[in-house]
Amino acid sequence: MKISRRLMLSAIGIAMSAAMPGLASAEGLIAILTPSHDNPFFKAEAVGAEARAKELGYETLVLVHDDDPNKQSELFDTAIARGAKAIILDNAGADATVAAVQRAKDAGIPSFLIDREIKESGIAVSQIVSNNYQGAQLGAEEFVRLMGETGKFAELVGREADTNAGIRSSGYHDIIDQYPEMEMVAQQSANWSQTEAYEKMETILQANPEIKGVISGNDTMAMGAWAALEAAGRTDVIVVGFDGSNDVRDSIKAGGIKATVLQPAYRQAQLAVEQADQFLKTGTTGQDEKQLMDCVLINADNAAKLETFALAD
């Protein structure tokens, strides 16, 4: 059976488009790299970035590095090999990420960072992060108020390699340490993990049964801590988180966790895509490389307005 030349060329074109999805878009391919989507914050970033990129006419490549710098490096190689026009990144380490972003830049691919900074300037085009210090101070002020300015408490800290973990902890203590009757009896890293937070909270509670409050570096750890407290029948303990997740929103509405701090993950990711689009078309974002977005306190007063890391007007 003979196949016409036109049909053959059409078939080849379809096959090439399937193999190289970036060719299907007039604007090209944007790669979106985040930690695991098991964490709703990172999933919101990926969803927000992908939706905005598609609205602007780009093909997307959504990849997960699981906070593993080696895996992240491999994904950068994938994005470079695929001819990505830009990379949107929530990185896997302030130090470890520098080389990968530089490698992309050397290949002519600009990177736009969200949520976490890297320790070098002039390599990424944008570093758009929440004002973690300002947000932590909001959370600490609410925590102190809920604690009545007195009592023993524990702190759950994020990954030590993540600059946000240290910034949030500093913001917490710059407020809490002003109150001499507030006593920290335990400070443990749970690596942003709900499972680790559950286990650490069990241990902390056994050693400090008189504990009155827990302040957490993110909502995922706050949820783990709250689950451990519930299992131990200690729902009297005050828990405050950081992120503004729907899970913590629901807990606040149900009278469980008392407060969190919203960082606008969805909008932040969309903004990074918009700046990537502008940079690709004009050669500039019109903004400084490092940009801060203020956080918002979420408690029983406004939790009902929170949806997917965004607060309704």
Image: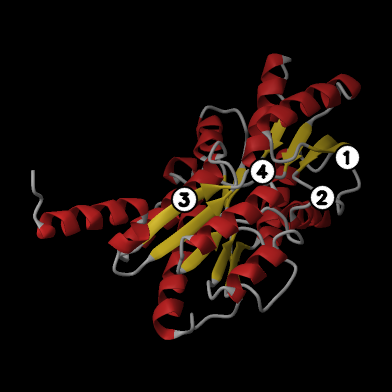
Residue 177 placement (x, y as % from top left): 87, 52
Instruction: Specify whether 83 is left or right of 113.
Output: left
* 106 in relation to 22, above or below: below
Q: Which quadrant of the view contains residue 251?
A: top right
Answer whether labels 2 and 3 touch (C-beta < 8 Å).
Answer: no
Dot in front, 3 or 4: 3
* Residue carrying label 1: 184
Label 1: few (<14), some or many (≥20) within 10 Å? some
Residue in the foreground of this view, choosing between 231 and 125: 125
The residues tagged by marks 4 and 2 sit, at their Cα atoms, a distance apart of 17 Å
Q: Earlier in the sequence, mark 4 or mark 2?
A: 2
Dot in front, 2 or 3: 3
Q: Earlier in the sequence, mark 2 or mark 3?
A: 3
The residues tagged by marks 1 and 2 sit, at their Cα atoms, a distance apart of 9 Å
* Residue carrying label 2: 176
Instruction: Specify whether 192 is left or right of 178.
Output: left
Q: Earlier in the sequence, mark 1 or mark 2?
A: 2
* Residue carrying label 4: 218
- Type of residue at label 3? Val
- Type of residue at label 1? Met
**Rendered residue at 32%/66% (across/down):** 56
* Residue carrying label 3: 62
Q: Secondary structure at mark 3?
A: strand
Residue 103 seen in this snapshot: yes
